[in-house]
Every structure is written in structure tokens, then in C-alpha cells.
């Protein structure tokens, strides 16, 4: 099957300048001996016959259009076009053409058009190309003239030659004389030829010809020639319209004749371009660029001539601001000023800045204060257009003027408030003016285009002014329509106005900070806006929802607390339930807001929604949003419970400075409890292995003390540090041959926790707490070899000490090593009591810094020791 990339339609331009379809086939490029070069071949899709055999000439201008079209001229009067089914096929053939001609395939035309002045182009024409000889301008030669001009449009070189010939021979004026004769004779056929001649002269796109055609004495005849369109059964009445119906109004008499002539000429040429000339085809879309440029430069010249006439502009603004000026006269002045501003859009940036500075110095803003408030609709509409031009170009000019007014003008006379009033009071049922004024306010309130310098902050000053003097006027219709928690007015014009106000307020929430926040809190604005959720107009309901969505998106805790305190999700939930799960924009918008709360994990709003509206939303199953929201809430509550259960653990053991790797902690605990597997009895217990000497005992104790944060205790108390040093790893270091370890120096060793030595000479105050202590000493006499004595102490907790409900009676095992035949016990039969702490340290929570004092009665009841509370 043939590749569809090369499938094309072949077109040829006929004598009527219309494209004829010559058939559909497949194109290829190959060397043809007969033509002695690379050629384009098109064979018919139906029977394979040859539709086209065209040699790619090195000087032929091939043009690529619209990605799938290649157009070129084959000889003097034969234009061809290939329309490709696929862009890829067009690109392949285009690359082949460019390869033959030595051109870059990225160009859209293979023969460059020289962008030089007309004189330079004419001078640079090849001497080998003969000049075009125009036939005599006679009635019987019109058809021949028309064919010649049509044929010359095919190549840029011939167009240049033809334009030069027409200009040099004054051919246009000769044709106009023939037109007068034809019109007198009512020779319709010849008039049709003249229509084609002048239409094609326009397509030559030459400014020198336009200057002649648009001169005062010729332009109406040109328009007359273009009235006789062969496709129209009757002539058009363009000349009658321009002469009789189109009236030129002079708001102020223009004494500058040059300015007056330019205004007339520009209007008529614009009319020819927009109305008289046929709409250019796809192949002619750029052929009238010079005509557009002609109009453009005319407008620029008009603006410059008006701007330079200071007397004219001064008189204009004096009449505009004069209260005695009739309304009809003021309307004409405003319409002229609007057209003047419209023409200024063609100015370069520097000239445009000078233009608006001139208007500002002449007092255009005070004039607009008057014209905006007028009842005449045309005057008001034109004034809004002028204000829009000014604000779009330089909003700072209007802001600066407003700030000057704020200090010395009544609020209702401030320009900003006049704009808001006119937006609210727009009489147009479709609120066309209100929409335009809302756009003006949005530009003025946009912080992105506000200036800021060292000595001046336009943003701060203007926003302060707006929220002090103007915001109340803007929200008045909103507050009036939401009294008694129900929408008061539901007519289309009013709800459309409320929609515009909500759109502007949503913009303020997004771009302003504390200014709009204060307004919302002071006026309880969100509550009033959510009343509109009950409206019968869905677009207004969505506007109210969008405003709340903007607040939620800020993730501001002030707004969140405001929403929670006012229970402001209730109108949204009610609207959601009233919608009954219908698949519409309201349903999606509400779900999206809760989805945002879930994804951003806004805990306060999540808890509020689940706790207050969970029952209403638990049956919503067609989306997972609310179930996931409930799951998030449950997870959060579980975390809170876990955190609260750790409040009794001292903060010094949970402080992040003493945190250790969780895996290391678990490994050490597992090793410890594996060694204690045999301690299954609460009474007398026996250790499988005991360190051979006190040095090994000390190393064991050191590792245990480190695991529960004893180093924190050493930093808290010098006394505790000295006591800790008396046991553990430093016991062996302090031994000496002359001073052997006595039984009193090592009272007891706790199997799973820190211990404190009882100091009979301690200066600590004696504190006796009401607790009951039972000590069971089972000391046995060991053989001459080194042995151990196991002492078990059972302690009951004091009434003031909290006890875990799952914690059994605390059993403390005290191991005392024996040396020789002497069993180490306390000198008076007393042993120190230490607690094994169940679930000793929580490394994550709690902040209690309390300590508990415990007195252990060792028989004499005279000594006490102080220790930290570990559980």
C-alpha cells in the first residue's frame, strides 16, 4: 500500500483567480532525464497517470503554508499548489526542494524578498528582466489590463515591475477617467473589469500607489470602482454612505487643516479595509500589510498633531469640566476623547507615556469624575473606556490621585468610591459597565503592579486608603442582601452584581493580608457571604463557596479558628446535603474543599468537621474523601492519647538531648531481660552468673546506668554524681591493697536500675513519708571460696505514689558479693531498697520535672535519702 504521507491534492489557479482541483495522487521527487533535473512527480491515485511533472528550478519561489501546503508559480501564468494529507509528507518534499535550491528547510519561502525601500528594490532589479509594458488605458483594453495585472501577482519580481510601471505612467488617474466614462455609459461589464483591476492593485501592497489612491480627489472614485463587485447583483452604495450618512462631528472646531484632512482620510481608508475590500483568502492574508501600516501611521500622526495643539486640548478639558456645558456637547467631547485615547494605543512606549502625562496634567481624572456619574449611557460608556485605557497603562497615576483626594475630599467624591458606586448602580441588565469597572478595580488593587521605594510605599498607603474609605461601600449590597440569614433579592441583575463583588473580595483574600482579614473579622463577613449558599442561582452559590475556599487555602489558624468558632461549615454541609449527590459543579467544588483539608492535614478543621458533621457525612460513599478524613481524625486522636499517657515520665528522661537510637535501646533491653529469664519468682532468686570481681560488677552497672539516662542525673546534682561514682565501673579503680573494700562501702546492687548509697553523715533533711516497707533478708554463709548472697526486698508503694494498673508488686533483687568467709551485709542488718521501674524510659513524650523523696527505714529510722521519681 502506498505511503499516505505522500498523498496530495493538486490545485491550479485559473484565470478567475480561483483554485481548480486537478486530482488526487501521490507525489515523489526524482531525476527526470527529459527535464535534466530533479522534478516533482504526481501520479493519479485512481489509474496511476501522470498529473504533474515539474522540474525544481533553482530560482523559482516555492512557498510553504499552513504546514501542509506548497505553492509556486510554473511559468508566467500558471500557479500550482500541493495540499498534503500529512504534515510529515509535506516536510519531506519541502526538504527536497530546499536541497535542490540550496536553502535552509526552516524557511517558509525559498526565494528571499528583499526588505529594502521601494527605490532600492527598483534600482536593484535585474537588467535582464524587461519592464512591463502597460496597454493603453482605453475602454476596449480593460479586459487585457485586468489579465495582465492578475498575471503579474504571481511573482515578487513581476509585482515590483508592475507597481513601478503604474506609478511612473500615472496609470491610476487614467483608469479613473475610464471609470467615469464607463459609469456614464452604464457599461456594467467594463465596470466589473475595473473592479478586478483596482482590487489587484491593492494586492500589489505598495505605499506609493496608496498615496495616490487615497488622495482627496481620487479616494471616492476608488470606492466607486469597488462598488461594482461581479459577485453582487447590484452595486453597493459605499459612496453615498461616506458622503451622506457618515457625519463628522466637531466637538471643538479644528482649525488645523492638515489634522482635519488626516482624520477624514484615516476614516475612509479604514472603511475601505473593513467594509469595501473583500475578505482576503488564505493565500492573500499578508498581502494587505502595507494598507494596515498606512492606517497605523496615520493614527500616530493624528495623535501627535492633537497633542501638540495645547490650545485645542485646554479648551476641550475646560468645556468638559464646566458644569454649564450641555449634555449633548459633553457627550461629543467624551466621544472625541475616547477616540483620541484609542488612537494612542498605536504609540511607542515613550510617546505613550508622554501622551498620558499630557492628559493627566490637563485634568482628565477630575473630568472623569463628572462624566462617570452622568445619566447619559453613551457618555458613561465612553468614560469607562477612557478610564480603562488609563488604568491599564499606568494604574499608579490613578492611585496617586486617589491618595491626594483622601486627605482633602469627602468620601463620596473620591474617584475610587465613584467607580464603586457606578459599578453598583449600573443600569445595564447585563451589567456590561459593572464588569468593566470591576476589572479596573482589580488592576488598582493588585499589589503586583504597585510601586515601592525607600521613601514611599504605594502598596501600604493605597490599601490603607481603600480599606478605610471604600471597602464599606463595596460590601454594602452584600450586607443588605443577607439580613435575617436568607437572601433578600434573587433577581438576575442583583445576584450578578453580588457575584462580581464576591469575585473582587476573593481576589483581595488571595492578594491582601491583614487588611482584608480585619474586615472579615470585624464585619463577620464570611457568615454573611455563606448565607448566599441558600440562593437559587447556582453560580452565586459557587461564588460564595469560592470565597470560603480561598480562606481555607491560606491555612491560616486565625481563619481556621474563626470558621470553627462560628460553625461556618454548616451552610456548606447543608448545601451539600441538599444537592443529594447530583453530579454537578457544586458537588465537585465542595468535595474538593474537603479533599484539600485532608491532603494538607489541617488538623483543626479536620477535627471540627468529623466531630460536628461526621454523622451527616458517614453515608457518603461515592467518594473516599470523608471516610479518609474520619480515618485521619482517628489517627490523630490515638496520637493524642499516647502523648497524654506519657505525662508522668520525667522530662529529663524524655528530653531530646538524651535521646538514643531506638534500635540500640531495644537491643540493650532485650539483652538485659534475656539475662533475667530465671527471675520468675517474686521471692528469693538466684543469678546464674556473677562477675568474678567488683570491677566486672561495675562495668555491668555502668552500661545499665547509661541506658536509663543516669548521666542526666549526674548533671543535676553534684551529690548524686558522687554517690553514683561510689558504685559501678569506678569501684575497682578506687580500691587499693592497703584499703580493701569493706562491706559498708557496697551496700547493694540493683539488678535493673540506678541505686543510691545510704550516707549516714548526709546533711540532707530527714523526710519521712508515710509508706510501709517490708524487708526479707535471707543471708547465708558461704564456703571459703567467693560466693554470693541473694537478698530479696519487697516494697509496697506509698499512697502518694501513682501505680500502674498493670504493674505487679515491685520486687527488688539485691546482690551482695562475699569475700572469703564473710558475707557482705549492712552493718546493722539494713539493706538499701531500690525499685525496678517497669517500662522505665519513654524517649518521646512528657515534660514533668517533679522528683519524689522516699525514706527507707533500715531499722534505726534515722537516715533518709532523696532520689528522683522514675515512674
Image (cartoon, rainbow, N blue to C red):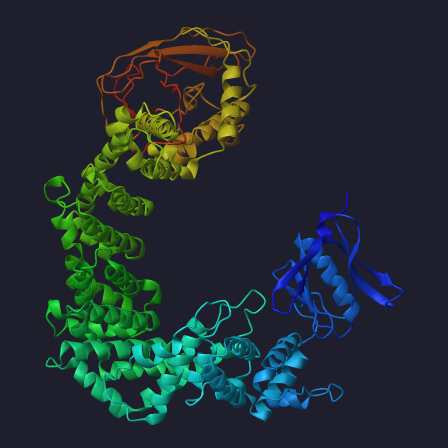
Give 545 or 613, whichever is nearer the viewer. Answer: 545
- In which quadrant is the N terminus drawn? top right
Q: Does residue 88 sit above or below 833 in this rendering? A: below
Which x, y percent locates residue 597?
Answer: 34, 38
- In which quadrant is the C terminus drawn? top left
Q: Does residue 83 sit above or below 400 in this rendering? A: above
Side (left or right) of 585 relative to 678 = left
Give 724 or 667, whichever is nearer the viewer. Answer: 667
Which x, y percent locates residue 610?
Answer: 29, 29
Side (left or right) of 673 relative to 481 = right
Residue at 22 percent of width and 38 percent of height: 564
Side (left or right) of 558 relative to 308 = left
| Residue 854 figure quarter | top left
| Residue 9 figure quarter | bottom right
Residue at 51 percent of width and 90 percent of height: 173
| Residue 346 figure quarter | bottom left
Whether residue 764 appears in this view of the structure is no
Whether residue 61 appears in this view of the structure is yes
Which x, y percent locates residue 738?
Answer: 51, 28
Give 231 or 862, whichever is nearer the viewer. Answer: 231
Residue at 45 percent of width and 85 percent of height: 214
Amino acid at each position: 500500500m502506498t505511503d499516505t504521507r505522500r498523498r496530495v491534492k493538486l490545485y491550479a489557479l485559473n484565470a478567475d483567480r480561483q483554485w481548480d482541483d486537478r486530482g488526487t495522487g501521490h507525489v515523489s521527487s526524482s531525476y527526470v532525464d527529459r527535464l535534466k533535473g530533479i522534478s516533482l512527480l504526481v501520479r493519479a491515485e485512481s489509474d496511476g497517470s501522470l498529473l504533474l511533472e515539474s522540474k525544481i528550478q533553482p530560482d523559482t519561489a516555492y512557498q510553504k503554508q499552513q504546514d501542509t501546503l506548497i505553492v509556486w508559480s510554473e511559468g508566467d501564468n500558471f500557479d500550482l499548489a500541493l495540499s498534503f494529507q500529512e504534515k510529515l509528507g509535506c516536510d519531506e518534499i519541502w526538504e527536497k526542494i530546499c536541497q535542490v535550491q540550496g536553502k535552509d528547510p526552516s524557511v517558509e519561502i525559498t526565494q528571499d524578498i528583499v526588505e529594502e525601500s521601494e527605490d532600492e528594490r527598483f534600482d536593484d532589479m535585474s537588467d535582464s528582466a524587461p519592464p512591463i509594458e502597460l496597454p493603453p488605458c482605453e475602454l476596449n483594453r480593460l479586459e487585457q489590463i485586468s489579465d495582465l495585472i492578475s498575471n503579474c501577482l504571481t511573482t515578487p519580481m513581476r509585482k515590483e515591475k508592475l507597481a513601478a510601471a503604474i506609478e511612473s505612467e500615472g496609470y491610476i488617474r487614467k483608469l479613473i477617467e475610464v471609470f467615469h466614462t464607463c459609469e456614464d455609459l452604464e457599461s456594467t461589464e467594463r465596470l466589473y473589469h475595473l473592479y478586478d483591476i483596482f482590487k489587484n492593485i491593492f494586492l500589489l501592497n505598495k505605499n506609493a500607489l496608496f498615496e495616490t489612491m487615497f488622495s482627496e480627489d481620487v479616494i471616492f472614485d476608488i470606492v466607486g470602482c469597488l462598488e461594482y463587485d461581479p459577485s453582487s447583483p447590484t452595486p453597493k452604495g459605499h459612496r453615498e454612505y461616506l458622503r451622506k450618512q457618515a457625519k463628522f462631528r466637531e466637538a471643538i472646531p479644528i482649525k488645523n487643516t492638515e489634522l482635519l484632512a488626516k482624520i477624514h482620510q484615516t476614516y475612509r481608508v479604514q472603511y475601505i479595509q473593513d467594509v469595501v475590500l473583500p475578505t482576503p483568502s488564505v493565500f492573500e492574508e499578508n498581502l494587505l500589510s502595507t494598507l494596515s501600516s498606512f492606517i497605523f501611521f496615520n493614527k500616530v500622526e493624528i495623535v501627535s498633531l492633537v497633542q501638540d495643539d495645547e490650545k485645542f486640548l485646554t479648551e476641550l478639558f475646560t468645556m468638559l469640566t464646566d458644569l454649564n456645558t450641555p449634555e449633548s456637547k459633553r457627550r461629543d467631547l467624551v466621544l472625541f476623547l475616547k477616540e483620541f485615547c484609542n488612537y494612542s494605543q498605536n504609540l511607542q512606549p515613550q510617546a505613550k507615556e508622554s501622551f498620558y502625562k499630557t492628559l493627566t496634567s490637563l485634568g482628565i481624572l477630575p473630568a472623569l469624575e463628572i462624566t462617570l456619574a452622568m445619566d447619559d449611557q453613551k457618555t458613561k460608556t465612553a468614560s469607562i473606556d477612557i478610564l480603562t485605557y488609563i488604568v491599564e497603562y499606568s494604574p499608579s497615576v490613578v492611585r496617586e490621585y486617589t491618595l491626594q483626594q483622601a486627605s482633602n475630599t469627602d468620601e463620596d467624591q473620591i474617584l475610587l468610591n465613584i467607580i464603586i458606586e457606578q459599578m453598583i448602580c449600573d443600569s445595564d441588565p447585563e451589567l456590561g459597565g459593572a464588569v468593566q469597572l470591576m476589572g479596573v478595580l482589580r488592576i488598582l488593587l493588585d499589589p503586583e503592579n504597585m510601586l515601592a521605594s525607600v521613601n514611599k510605599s504605594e502598596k501600604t498607603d493605597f490599601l490603607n486608603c481603600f480599606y478605610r474609605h471604600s471597602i464599606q461601600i463595596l460590601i454594602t449590597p452584600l450586607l443588605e442582601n443577607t439580613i435575617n440569614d436568607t437572601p433578600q433579592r434573587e433577581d438576575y441583575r442583583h445576584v450578578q452584581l453580588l457575584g462580581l463583588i464576591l469575585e473582587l473580595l476573593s481576589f483581595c483574600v488571595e492578594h491582601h493580608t491583614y487588611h482584608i482579614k480585619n474586615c472579615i473579622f470585624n464585619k463577620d463577613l464570611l457568615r454573611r457571604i455563606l448565607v448566599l449558599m441558600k440562593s437559587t442561582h447556582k453560580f452565586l452559590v459557587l461564588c460564595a463557596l469560592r470565597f470560603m475556599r480561598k480562606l481555607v487555602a491560606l491555612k491560616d489558624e486565625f481563619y481556621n479558628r474563626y470558621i470553627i468558632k462560628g460553625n461556618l461549615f454548616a451552610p456548606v454541609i447543608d448545601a451539600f446535603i441538599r444537592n443529594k449527590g447530583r453530579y454537578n459543579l457544586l458537588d465537585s467544588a465542595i468535595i474538593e474543599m474537603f479533599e484539600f483539608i485532608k491532603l494538607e492535614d489541617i488538623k483543626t478543621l479536620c477535627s471540627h468537621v468529623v466531630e460536628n458533621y461526621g454523622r451527616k457525612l458517614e453515608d457518603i460513599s461515592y467518594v473516599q474523601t470523608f471516610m479518609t478524613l474520619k480515618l485521619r481524625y482517628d489517627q490523630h486522636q490515638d496520637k493524642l492519647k499516647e502523648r497524654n499517657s506519657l505525662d508522668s515520665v520525667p522530662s529529663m528522661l524524655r528530653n531530646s538531648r538524651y535521646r538514643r537510637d531506638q534500635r540500640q535501646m531495644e537491643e540493650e533491653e532485650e539483652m538485659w531481660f534475656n539475662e533475667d529469664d530465671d527471675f520468675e519468682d517474686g521471692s528469693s532468686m538466684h543469678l546464674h552468673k556473677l562477675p568474678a570481681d567488683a570491677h566486672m560488677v561495675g562495668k555491668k552497672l555502668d552500661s545499665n546506668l547509661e541506658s536509663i539516662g543516669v548521666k542526666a542525673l549526674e548533671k543535676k546534682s553534684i551529690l548524686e554524681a558522687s554517690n553514683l561514682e561510689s558504685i559501678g565501673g569506678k569501684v575497682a579503680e578506687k580500691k587499693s591493697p592497703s584499703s580493701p573494700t569493706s562491706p559498708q562501702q557496697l551496700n547493694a546492687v540493683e539488678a535493673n536500675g540506678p541505686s543510691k548509697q545510704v550516707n549516714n553523715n548526709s546533711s540532707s533533711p530527714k523526710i519521712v513519708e508515710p509508706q510501709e516497707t517490708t524487708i526479707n533478708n535471707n543471708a547465708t554463709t558461704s564456703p571459703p571460696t567467693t560466693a554470693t548472697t541473694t537478698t530479696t526486698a519487697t516494697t509496697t508503694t506509698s499512697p502518694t505514689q501513682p501505680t500502674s494498673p498493670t504493674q505487679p508488686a515491685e520486687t527488688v533483687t539485691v546482690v551482695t558479693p562475699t569475700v572469703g568467709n564473710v558475707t557482705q551485709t549492712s552493718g546493722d542488718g539494713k539493706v538499701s531498697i531500690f525499685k525496678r521501674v517497669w517500662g522505665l524510659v519513654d524517649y518521646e513524650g512528657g515534660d514533668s520535672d517533679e522528683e519524689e523523696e522516699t525514706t527507707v527505714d533500715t531499722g534505726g529510722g534515722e537516715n533518709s535519702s532523696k532520689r528522683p521519681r522514675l515512674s
